[in-house]
Image: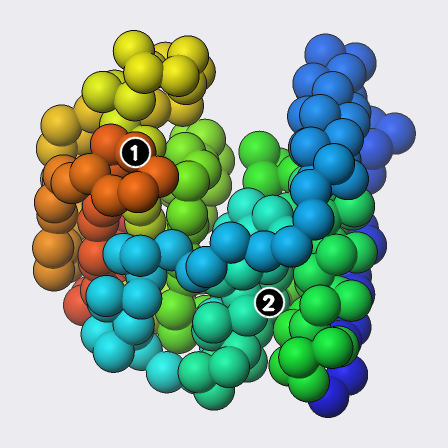
Amino acid sequence: MPVSGNFTVGGLIGLAPFAYLRSMISDSIKWNERHGAKTGFHAPDSYLQQQFSRLKPGKALDMACGRGRNAFLLAAGGFETIAADIAEVGLQHLRAAAHERHLSVETMLIDLDEPDLLNQKAPFDTIICINFKPGKALLKLIPDLLSQDGTFLWVSFNELQVALNAFPPAKALHPEEFVDSFTSLKMIEYKRFTDETGHRDAYLFTKTATGDDKACC
């Protein structure tokens, strides 16, 4: 099956403020270096595997997909899968591995702090966000990106992880931080747990109504 790519980054770069550009480039370089130093692939996320049967089938978006371990699970499970990330090196690994596995995955190079380009691919029936804390703009946009009855699965490290391995405090989730964040998403589950990767918080939402949405940050 073909593996396609969309290589537009965060809109019109020439109009972006210098501080934003510097931050975007810094993040891109950091993650390209990290992905370039890795070989092989970890197993798909444990919480995603546990909740897989609860995801709405159809088109799926893997936000901050990295090298693609979770996108592979979605594609193998029959989802039309789009994998979005800021690191081209990670997406190169993803495309090569998807080809070897005969999986169809579309990649999208994007700075998720400037997420409006995701509207071009919406609506999504399922959105997953693994080990990443979206910024305000992306959190605000997520309900609009989902189809009716669409599912949003989000799991990442919490504040307990900060003391263990210097996980960035600003990236950590906190107890019940987003339980009441979305007016048109119904929370199916929230849990705090520890697995082989560390201390984590997990959310599973479904879109149940239309209207204005807000995201707490």
Look at 14% across and 39% down and name the residue there: 192
Question: Which sits in the foreground, 217 or 109?
Answer: 109
User: Mark 2: few, some, or many residues within 10 Å (few <14, many ≥20)?
Assistant: many
Look at 58% across and 56% down and name the residue there: 41
x%, y% of residue 98?
Answer: 69, 73
x%, y% of residue 133?
Answer: 41, 34
Q: Which residue is mark 1?
A: 198
Question: The residue under label 2 is which amino acid type?
Answer: Ile
Q: Which residue is mark 2?
A: 82
Q: Secondary structure at mark 1?
A: strand
Image quadrant occupied by the N terminus: bottom right
Distance in Å between CA atoms under marks 2 and 1: 27 Å
Question: The residue under label 1 is which amino acid type?
Answer: Gly
Look at 15% across and 40% down and name the residue there: 193
Q: Secondary structure at mark 2?
A: strand
x%, y% of residue 26?
Answer: 74, 20
x%, y% of residue 3?
Answer: 76, 76
> Which of the 4 image quarters holds residue 136?
top left
Look at 78% across and 61% down and name the residue there: 6
Question: Which sits in the foreground, 41 or 92?
Answer: 41
Q: Is residue 90 visible?
A: yes
Q: Image check: 77 left or right of 211?
A: right
Q: Image check: 57 left or right of 107?
A: left
The mark found on residue 93 in the picture is none
Q: Earlier in the sequence, mark 2 or mark 1?
A: 2
Asked if labels 1 and 2 touch by Cβ distance under 8 angstroms, the answer is no
Q: Image check: 10 left or right of 129?
A: right
